[in-house]
Every structure is written in structure tokens, then in C-alpha cells.
Amino acid sequence: MDRRTIWKKLFPKKDSAEDNIMYVIAGLGNPEKKYQNTRHNVGFDVIDALASQYNITMKSRKHKALIGTGAICGARVMLVKPLTYMNRSGDSIAEILDFYKLSAEESLIVIYDDISLEPGSIRIRKKGSAGGHNGIKSIIARAGGSDFSRIRIGVGQKPQGWDLADYVLGRFSGEERKSVDEAIENACKAAGRMVNNETEAAMNEFNAKKRE
């Protein structure tokens, strides 16, 4: 079954977006309730925000993920929250790309936390290394390379003396949360531009943004 046939099954109603490329927008995180609102789950937070903004229902459980399908800015999208735990995110992403016969370079956008950026900052890239992030390492290993778009959400640098796992699995302070909520809003805007073939414009706008 080719990609177009699969896509028609997902979206049987014909409209102007029928011939648009399918995008998989995956936010990384850990599935258990105890991980909600932690630094490491900010990718999940962006997916939740996108689902709310574009009325996409996240109820289907398949491909080792919680998924929802819909349209963002006229483009057909699948929102994905892998349920494999962070270190095995690539298991879910690779299965989705393979099943829908999609190219990671053309169709995949991954959203995740970055401790090298201050809270409130985002960075968009078309490709790159894992930068020490285990979720991205897993995707690179399982999806066949590092050529896929990503939106990195700043969660702040680990304080000296802290264990990295304790830090990323911890929660934001009140002031940090306000900044991160702003970053989530910007990430949603950026994703909308990226699925509309405006990645360069999104990079120019959001990579240059600085907190006031």
C-alpha cells in the first residue's frame, strides 16, 4: 500500500490539503503521570498545545505511541507522543515512518528539551547531532540518520553539582514555567510555519528571538 492510499484511509474526506505532504510532528517525553510537567517532557507539552489549538484528538494508541491526525495550516499532520520512554523514542518514530512510507528528512519534525538553552528560548534546525540527548540518539539510530527537522525547547542549564537525570526529571520554578509556556507557544507557531514549507523563515524569526 503506497503512502497516498494510506493517507486517504486516514483522511477520506477530500479537500484542498489532500495532496500536501504528510508531516509527523513528534514531541519527546516519558509516558507516566509522574513525569508530567517535568523539563524532560516539554516535547509532550508542545504536542498537547498543538492538539488543543488545532482540535486534533490524541486518543489513538498504535506504533508504540499516542497519536492524533488532523490538519495544521492546511497541511496533513500526525501528532505523536512516543510511549516507549525517552531512551527508546526511535522505536516508535521509525515504525511510523516505515508504516506510512515517509522520509524523515522530508516529513519528520521532532520537538524536545535542551539544557543548553535558557528557559523561554527555542532553536529550529533542519538536521544535526544528538547533542547528548538520548531521545534524539535513539531516533538517529533507528530512523536511519540525523537529517530531520527539530525544534529544541530551552529548559536551562543543570546547576553545578546536580545529577543530570534528577535535573531533567525535575519541574520548573514558577518564573521558569512562565518562560517555558511562552516557548511552547512559539514552538507551536514555528511548527505551523514549518509544515507550510517556511522552515527558513521560522528559523530567522524564532532562532533570533531573545527573552526581554
Image (cartoon, grey):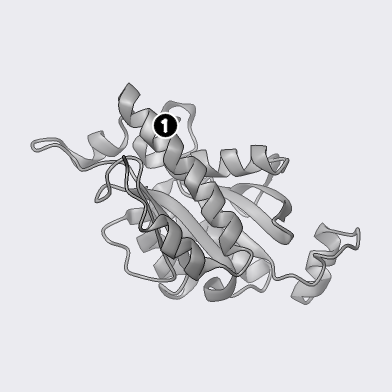
Residue 131 in percent (x, y) is at: 27, 61
Residue 48, image x and y in percent?
58, 38
Left or right position of 16 against 110: right
Q: Residue at x 37, y 35 (%)?
A: 179
Q: Which residue: 49% across, 61% down?
A: 202
Closer to us: 120 or 33: 120
Q: Position of residue 79 (x, y in %)?
A: 63, 51
Q: Quadrant of the C terminus?
A: top left
Tell me the SS state at disc 1.
Answer: helix
Q: Which residue is mark 1?
A: 35
Residue at the image position 43 percent from the left and 54 percent from the top: 88
Does residue 118 sit above or below 137 in this rendering? above
Where's residue 21, x and y in %? 70, 71
- Left or right: where 151 falls relative to 109: left
Nearer to me, 173 or 26? 173
Residue 110 visible in image: yes
> Where does the N terminus fall, quadrant-wise?
bottom right
- The answer to which image quadrant residue 75 occupies is bottom right
| Rendered image quadrant of residue 96 | bottom right
Which residue does the image show at 26% across and 58% down from the upper left? 132
Say which amino acid is labelled 1.
Tyr
Kindly give the residue lying farthest to the front in the view shown: 212
In the picture, measured across the screen, residue 15 lies left or right of residue 123, that is right
Can residue 38 be seen at all in this image of the molecule?
A: no
Local packing at callout 1 (Cα closer than 10 Å; few below 14, some 14-19, many 20+) is some
Is residue 157 shown above or below 78? above
